[in-house]
Amino acid sequence: MPQVSSSYKTASYASTKGQDYLTLLGTSTDGSTYLEGPCMFELGSFELGYYCGFNPDSKLPVVPGFPLSNQSITSLITGDGKSATSYLADFISDLVVTKDAIFGFGFAIALMVAFVYSYLMTLGLVDCVVWGCILVVFALFFGLGGYMYYTYQQWDAANCDAPDDDGSTDCTGLNVAHSDNEIDGMMYVSYFCFGVSALWVAFIICICSKIRLACAFVKVAGTAVRDMPIVLFFPVVQIAGLLLFLLPWMYYMAFVQAQGLFLCENTCGGDSDYCNGMKDGKQFDCSLSEVGSTYPSNETKYTWEWADASIGSDQDLASSWMMFSYFWTSQFIVAMGQLVMAMTFVLWYFAGYDADQEEQVAVQTAAAEGEKIEPKKPVGCCYKLICGDPDNYRGNGLFFKGLHLVLYHVGTAAAGSLVIAIIQFIRYMVAKIQAQCNKSLTGTAKTIANIVLCCIQCCLYCLEKCMKFINKHAYIITAVKGKSFCAAACDSFWLIVRNIRLIAALTMVQEFSIIIGKMLIVMATGTLSYMYMQSVTNAAGLTMADQTNSLIGPTLFVMILAYFMADMFLNTYSMAMDVMMHCYLSDKEANSPMWATNEKATHLAPLAKVIGENGPKDDPKKDTENPSAE
């Protein structure tokens, strides 16, 4: 094969040897055509797998008379001279430059904003948020219904197929595109929106008295979270525990899924025990007379065959057991977290209650014996500031006390998580059966099977959600009364039935508070981070905006981190609301007057205010037959 000279690699403009450079490139001087000739520039390239791709940011050489000299290929396409790779590099560069601000605002400042939000909710923002959301929901459905009804009237007035018998017409146009079915559909949808808005008003009227009580729970829960901020970081411990479990679980799951064996493609010498040079897993030399004649060589040739993974096989049973262990362990970690937080908030609600009861007993005993008890010496302000009030302590120490008490209820968490794990495992098996049906069935049988299995999945999903709701309240009852799981679950069910209006009101208030809270925390954190990066300068007098291509990417990254922090904070906040409701109901059943109305329970002042305003209606002395009617 003749050797080709490589001088073209170093050719320059002067090496065209009489040929017009622009003609070779197929480029006109006015730029109307370019790079359409038989030759092409040498461009920078990079390896892309087994291929060689040109670098879109490499520039064309400088050629006299060439209108596109010193321009990149990307600039010819996009006009701005940047490729996707350049944008990604700029984005990563911006993140590196602003990493301190991103993590500072995404974690610390977001958490501070969340605390400020809970404090504002305690001051009364919760009332504005809840009633504002109630009005917005009503206005949304009513306004949507009004707009659709107006559209229906417009369509109905403009639609007719032909004039009346007398030649007159009561419509504004003939042969309009909207059919009678479309017009009727618009009318029915408008009636539906009006109906939903009416039902919404009726629902709010029904639970109006309970909304104020639910708002009080939100205020008290905010105080509890601020008094014990350490509970906010317990989800981090749960995540660490789950990751610690997943490390060996993934290893063994991969081992189960990788089961199989080597199979021989042919035999050596006609004996099935001799597999092309192998016998019983050991090296075996075939007869040299056969090698090269009957068989071309004695090289070992094996094929890998995966183990049978069909439903009911050994591998299927092993993988099913691994999935069940995952469901149970993950739900157990969630249950332990709920128990710890429930126990902590219960201790906070009744902080000082034992000391108050002991003091009352001592006073009564001394009065019966004709003695006088000296009042307890008050604790100094500095001691309270550093160590807390020993008779009414509501600090982070309650979290560790609750953590210790939860150790006596590990079985409750295991039983509750087992119920959820069984439901999830059944859903997993149904999904496997559905996948098998999609592979083996066709036509109508496949459609019917999918419909039935999808219905089963929906029912199991609803059952799982209901059981999670009951379990959460059962764990709180365990924390309040110390009952086992079965007894607590029964109490939880009947408590929901007896106090359906209060729970409905609290659920609505929780959802509004969480949704608005996430929006405010994310937007406030993003705004503060943008203002900081835009205005604060370093020692050289440069802001982060001067050192980056754009602050949009870092700000969005801050908002993503702030969302996760807001979610963690508000989930704990929501749990505290539920615990406050259970403590209120237990307090109402067991104490008269309630501990929440005691002058020493200053941390429950918002709840005591609502109880006092309700007066006899919420006085347990007036309702001895059903003390938990709330």
Image (tube, rainbow, N blue to C red):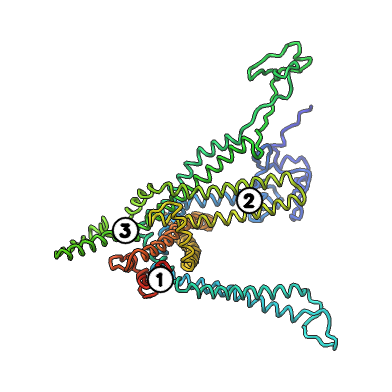
Location of residue 296 in the rendering, given as x and y in whole percent from the top left corner: 76, 18
Is disc 3 surrounded by few (<14), some (14 to 19) or many (20+) residues within 10 Å? Answer: many
Residue to which mark 2 is pinned: 83
| Residue at 79% over, 14% down | 293
The quadrant in which the C terminus is found is bottom left
Question: Marks 1 and 2: CB-CB under 8 Å?
Answer: no
Q: Distance between the residues labelled 1 and 2?
A: 52 Å
In this view, 465 is above or below 218: above
Left/right of residue 156 with respect to residue 545 in the rendered view: right
Q: Nearer the viewer, mark 3 or mark 2?
A: 3
Q: Farthest front residue?
A: 625
Q: How far apart are marks 1 and 3 (CA)?
A: 22 Å
Q: Nearer the viewer, mark 1 or mark 2?
A: 1
Q: How many marks?
A: 3
Location of residue 105 in the rendering, given as x and y in whole percent from the top left corner: 44, 56
Identify the mark nearer the N-term, 1 or 3: 1
Which numbered dot is residue 394?
Answer: 3
In this view, 347 is above or below 198: above
Location of residue 345 in the rendering, given as x and y in whole percent from the top left corner: 38, 58
Secondary structure type for disc 2: loop
Q: Which amino acid does label 2 sit on?
A: Ser
| Residue at 28% over, 65% down | 600
User: Considering depth in this image, is 242 or 486 the residue closer to the camera?
Assistant: 486
| Residue at 67% over, 18% down | 278
Q: Nearer the viewer, mark 1 or mark 3?
A: 3
Residue to which mark 1 is pinned: 124
Q: Which amino acid does label 1 sit on?
A: Gly
Secondary structure type for disc 3: loop
